[in-house]
């Protein structure tokens, strides 16, 4: 059992022990509350029967004890919920290490973009995807940040800064655990889109004098009501104060009502943000990027205090709905004063809160990479070079494959070698090899460790054509979809920096003659524009393209071996063109022998 698994199991056992103890305490306190409540009822009956007596003060003591038990019970309930989230955190970690991660997690389907040059082809999002495997973000902000990193390669300097941050966080399991536990208290609560919209919405437009006017009217209403009840002033004075207040409330309701109706969801989201900020406040980060993020919430205690102020305003909004409080609320123009206070908070804190949100989202994205580094300590942090189009790797495998099934390969592309043509028989692993290269390049250019012992890559733009589909509604065949993707990759090579292209079974939807001519023209054009790439094929005619390009291209292959009538694959890439096919053997293996022999 590996080091990370041992650590997770130890922490899981500790968390389960804590949870078990809290469950027992929670149950005992529940019984104690019930017993005290029954005692209160019984003593109340005794007091009524005896018209008071010693039962009254004793019952008062029981009531006080009952109130105390309620608070104690709630505190234990919160600790129990945290322990449950802690248990879930370590269980998820073990599930990833034991290749059971498909059972839960976030597939990130909402980030899918079929028009993206590699996201769908390399399975970046969706069930069983790269995002599904990596993401431990509990907030939508963190998930969105991670998704953007996987879709938009960073520059070499940014990647280096992320590496330092990831290495630091990988060594701090306690911090990563606490961030996940704090945010998972309200999964998905930090909806960055909704919260940003609320923070950046135009001001409600309360006139400058509304705040002092409502405060003065509230004082006037209370004072005149009290004076009238005491008989000091006539009733029409009170009525006049009420009518003025009613006019102000009615006139401002067009501003007040939207403010009060729109604040509750953002307040819930900000409550989760406060929990995260509370954990990182004053944390002694060492890496430059993490210190930079800490600057966004510098004085995080004040950031938390600001959010707590808004929470108190929302709590008052809840009190306003209480029927017993409604007369007081009407008397004091409570709703209008509350809306003005919320708007003042938004004007004062809105811009800063967006910064807090961004910083915490980046911290969660970095924590996802750090978790990957912690759980796979042998994975290499890549070297990303600002100039050039190349990939050099040793011991590379696909990060989504279980370790007992992933076959590592060494591979070099770049320099004078601009194209590698990979031929091979069916099921020999050509597509998986392309996806392994692509997935590791995506990780490398996002700032994550790669599933390899060494990985060096230029700062390339990635383009892939592996899983294109036809569209009946758009009247588009698979071949035409591939042609459009190839056009997009060529355009990227013409207009941008160096391109790495990954093409699976290139132009397989047309006849061999057109395929050979089209493939040659496209590949020679890409290479002429500074691109490098890998192409897989069953069609051995395409291997002639690599031969004709001499030192600029290389033929490699993946093959199978027929042993005792069974096909065996080693998934190792080898130089040269494949020398045998297995299509007939595969067809015969599923009972098509008679059809083939006829």
Image (tube, rainbow, N blue to C red):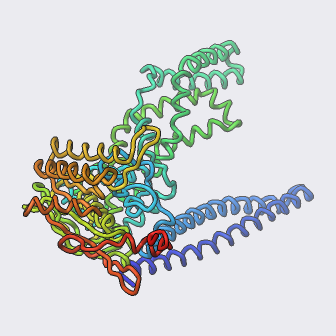
In this view, 274 is above or below 321:
below
Where residue 548 appears, as percent x and y from the top left, is: 11, 59
Residue closer to the observer: 100 or 359: 100
Where residue 532 appears, as percent x and y from the top left, is: 16, 56
The reply to whether residue 357 is visible in this rendering is yes
Position of 397 with respect to 240 (left or right) is: left
Question: The N terminus appears in which quarter of the rendering?
Answer: bottom left
Q: Residue furthest bottom?
A: 564
Quarter holding residue 451: bottom left
Residue closer to the observer: 508 or 299: 508
Q: Residue furthest right?
A: 49
In this view, 574 is above or below 131:
below
The reply to whether residue 364 is visible in this rendering is no
Residue closer to the observer: 469 or 89: 469
Name the residue rendered at 32%, 54% in the picture: 508
Where residue 576 appears, as percent x and y from the top left, is: 18, 71
Number of marks: 0
Residue closer to the observer: 320 or 397: 397
In this view, 450 is above or below 260:
below
Where residue 372 appears, as percent x and y from the top left, is: 34, 68
Name the residue rendered at 63%, 64% in the picture: 73
């Amino acid at each position: 059992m590996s080091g990370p698994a041992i650590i997770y199991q130890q922490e899981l056992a500790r968390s389960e022990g804590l949870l078990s103890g809290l469950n027992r305490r929670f149950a005992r306190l529940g019984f104690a509350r019930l017993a005290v409540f029954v005692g209160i009822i019984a003593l109340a009956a005794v007091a009524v029967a005896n018209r008071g007596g010693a039962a009254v003060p004793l019952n008062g003591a029981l009531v006080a004890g009952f109130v105390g038990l309620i608070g104690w019970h709630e505190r234990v309930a919160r600790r129990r919920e945290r322990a449950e989230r802690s248990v879930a955190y370590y269980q998820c970690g073990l599930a990833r290490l034991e290749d059971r991660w498909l059972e839960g997690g976030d597939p990130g389907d909402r980030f899918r973009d079929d028009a993206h040059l590699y996201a769908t082809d390399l399975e970046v999002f969706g069930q069983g995807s790269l995002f599904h495997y990596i993401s431990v973000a509990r907030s939508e902000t963190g998930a969105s940040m991670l998704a953007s990193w996987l879709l938009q390669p960073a520059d070499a300097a940014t990647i280096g800064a992320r590496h330092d941050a990831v290495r630091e966080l990988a060594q701090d399991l306690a911090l990563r655990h606490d961030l996940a536990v704090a945010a998972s208290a309200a999964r998905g609560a930090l909806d960055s889109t909704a919260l940003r919209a609320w923070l950046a919405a135009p001001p409600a437009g309360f006139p400058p004098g509304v705040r002092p006017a409502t405060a003065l009217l509230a004082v006037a209403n209370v004072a005149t009501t009290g004076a009238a009840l005491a008989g000091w002033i006539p009733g029409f004075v009170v009525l006049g104060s009420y009518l003025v207040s009613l006019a102000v409330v009615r006139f401002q309701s067009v501003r007040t009502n939207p403010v009060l109706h729109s604040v509750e969801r953002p307040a819930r989201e900000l409550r989760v943000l406060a929990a995260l900020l509370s954990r990182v406040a004053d944390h002694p980060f060492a890496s430059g990027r993490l210190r930079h993020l800490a600057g966004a919430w510098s004085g995080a205690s004040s950031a938390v205090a600001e959010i707590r102020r808004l929470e108190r305003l929302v709590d008052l909004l809840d009190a306003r709905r209480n029927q017993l409080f409604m007369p007081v609320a009407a008397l004091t123009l409570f709703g209008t004063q509350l809306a003005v206070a919320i708007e003042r908070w938004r004007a004062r804190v809105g811009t800063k809160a967006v910064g807090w949100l961004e910083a915490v989202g980046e911290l969660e994205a970095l924590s996802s990479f750090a978790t990957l580094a912690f759980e796979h300590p042998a994975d290499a942090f890549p070297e990303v070079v600002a100039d050039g189009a190349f990939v050099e790797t040793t011991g590379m495998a696909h990060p989504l494959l279980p370790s007992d099934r992933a076959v590592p390969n060494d591979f070099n592309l770049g320099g004078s070698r601009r194209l590698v043509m990979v031929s091979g028989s069916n099921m020999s692993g050509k597509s998986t090899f392309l996806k392994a290269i692509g997935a590791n390049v995506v990780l490398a250019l996002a700032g994550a460790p790669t599933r390899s012992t060494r990985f060096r890559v230029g700062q390339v733009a990635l383009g892939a054509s592996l899983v294109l589909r036809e569209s009946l509604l758009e009247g588009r065949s698979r071949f035409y979809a591939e042609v459009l993707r190839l056009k997009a990759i060529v355009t990227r090579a013409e207009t941008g920096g160096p391109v790495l292209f990954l093409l699976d079974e290139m132009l397989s939807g047309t006849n061999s003659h057109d395929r050979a001519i089209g493939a040659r023209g496209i590949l020679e054009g890409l290479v002429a524009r500074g691109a490098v790439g890998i192409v897989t094929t069953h069609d051995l005619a395409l291997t002639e393209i690599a031969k004709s390009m001499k030192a600029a291209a290389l033929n490699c292959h993946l093959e199978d071996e027929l042993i005792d009538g069974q096909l065996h694959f080693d998934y190792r890439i080898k130089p040269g063109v494949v020398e045998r096919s297995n299509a007939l053997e595969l067809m015969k293996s599923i009972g098509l022998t008679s059809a083939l022999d006829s």
